[in-house]
Image: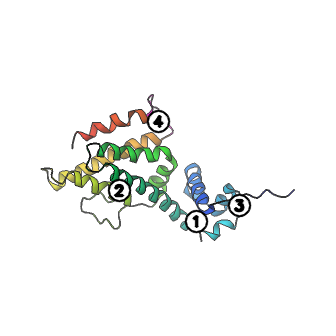
Amino acid sequence: MEKKRYHHKNLKNELIEKGIELVDQYGINQLSLRKVAQACNVSHAAPYSHFSNKEQLLREMQSHITNQFAAVLEDTVSKYKNTPDFLLEFGKAYISFFMKWPQYFSFLFQQGNIRIDLDIDGNEECNYRPFTIYKEQILKLLADADMSQSKKEDLVIALFAYVHGLTALTTMKNVHYSHKWEDKLNDLIKIFSCEF
């Protein structure tokens, strides 16, 4: 019997997504181009037309997530900047992105190779782009605030830790919460917005 062939519209994207799923399930050390090919039901040689090795696949997986995440944050900035709801909507966009794709959160922050510089005047060229978008927006909100640079840096870090921690909770399979996260995000984020 002839093996059924599958048509793949965007094989590269499918290989990337499947790679992220496999890392989420089995860890980064278990990932290989062969396993990704098998999971996508293509020949073992097929991934090599898109990636020269596992390391390139991992870089592409990280870029794939980062580009989507940054686009969501930039879209939120363009819709809500200079509005009273900006902080709330930005926090919701951050958390909701990873609630939709929890495997992305796990990959980026546990398996990925991103660099986050928390210093208020850190080198943004080397910083993780979504964090840079976040930091720039918070510093704009604090531009006219009567507080020291050190206090502003503390707020940037504390707010990031709060939203990032909420995101971690919403994506962890072993965390029980009797409410739907979607219903509680407004209340949880507004707790912190009183600082601004």
Amino acid at dot 1: Lys
| Disc 1 + disc 3, Cβ < 8 Å | no
Residue occupied by mark 2: 131
State the count of labels.
4
The residue at the point 31 percent across, 65 percent down is 124
Residue 54 location in percent, x, y?
58, 65
Quadrant into which the C terminus falls: top left
Which tag, 2 or 4, sits closer to the chain's start? 2
State the residue in front, 165 or 5. 5
CA gap between label 1 and label 2 equals 26 Å
Residue occupied by mark 1: 54
Amino acid at dot 3: Val
Q: Which span is picked out in magenta?
A: 173-180
Which tag, 3 or 4, sits closer to the chain's start? 3
* Foreground label between 1 and 3: 3
Amino acid at dot 4: Val
Residue 170 location in percent, x, y?
44, 40
The residue at the point 38 percent across, 43 percent down is 92
Which tag, 1 or 3, sits closer to the chain's start? 3
The residue at the point 50 percent across, 37 percent down is 174
| Disc 2 + disc 3, Cβ < 8 Å | no
Quadrant into which the N terminus falls: bottom right
